[in-house]
Image: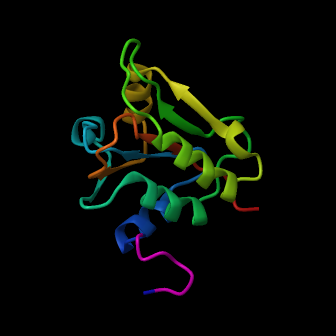
Amino acid sequence: MLKGISPMLSPELLKVLCEMGHSDTIVIADGNFPAETMGRNRIVIRMDGHGVPEILEAILHVFPLDQYIEQPVSLMERVPGDNADVSIWKTYEKMIEKEEPRGVKVIRKLERFEFYEEAKKAYAVIATSETSQYANVILQKGCVL
């Protein structure tokens, strides 16, 4: 255990977050996301039993978002015609406003297959048990100033 570090951040996840460099990305994936497929040839961290919000909150506390791009946070946009509940996005917005001086302006939404293409380039994918649909998040790392 470490002081000031969420126990949600396992040794494996902390190692990955530290290894990542500026502009590297990490996916926090919901339970329906094809983590192993998208994370092929990448690091896949299983965090079964946990949801995206609790993991996102812990990561945002220690993870600098890329300050050189306008939107270092990506969400998967709903497929047209899909009325899935995306109220989880409000939870993400509150967390980001707490940790990021630029606020919710750092968030963008990507069409489903565009999101998948970005996920394939990620340094790592975190597979969760999140049951909310469209709960996937990609974070792009910045620099500690």
**Can residue 40 be seen at all in this image of the molecule?**
no
Of residues 63 and 54, the one drawn nearer to the viewer in this rendering: 54
Examine the rendered structure and indicate whether residue 41 appears above or below residue 54. Answer: above
Give the overall secondary structure of the magenta segment: loop
The number of callouts visible is: 0
For this orientation, the residue located farthest to the top is 81
Q: Locate residue 95 relative to residue 45 in the image: left or right.
A: right
* Place of residue 105 in the rendered image (x, y in percent of width and height, measured from the top left): 71, 37
Q: Quadrant of the N terminus?
A: bottom left
Q: Quadrant of the C terminus?
A: bottom right
State the extent of the magenta-drawn residues as a range: 2-8
**Can residue 88 be seen at all in this image of the molecule?**
yes
* Place of residue 63 in the rendered image (x, y in percent of width and height, measured from the top left): 59, 60
Of residues 13 and 54, the one drawn nearer to the viewer in this rendering: 54
> Is 109 part of what is drawn in magenta?
no
Examine the rendered structure and indicate whether residue 2 appears above or below residue 21. Answer: below
The residue sitting at 59% across, 44% down in the picture is 23
The residue sitting at 45% across, 54% down in the picture is 53
The residue sitting at 42% across, 77% down in the picture is 7
Q: Locate residue 9 relative to residue 139 in the image: left or right.
A: left
* Place of residue 3 in the rendered image (x, y in percent of width and height, measured from the top left): 54, 87
Q: Locate residue 45 relative to residue 66 in the image: left or right.
A: left
Examine the rendered structure and indicate whether residue 130 appears above or below residue 135. Answer: below
Q: How is the image coloured?
A: rainbow
* Place of residue 102 in the rendered image (x, y in percent of width and height, measured from the top left): 76, 46
The residue sitting at 29% across, 35% down in the picture is 38
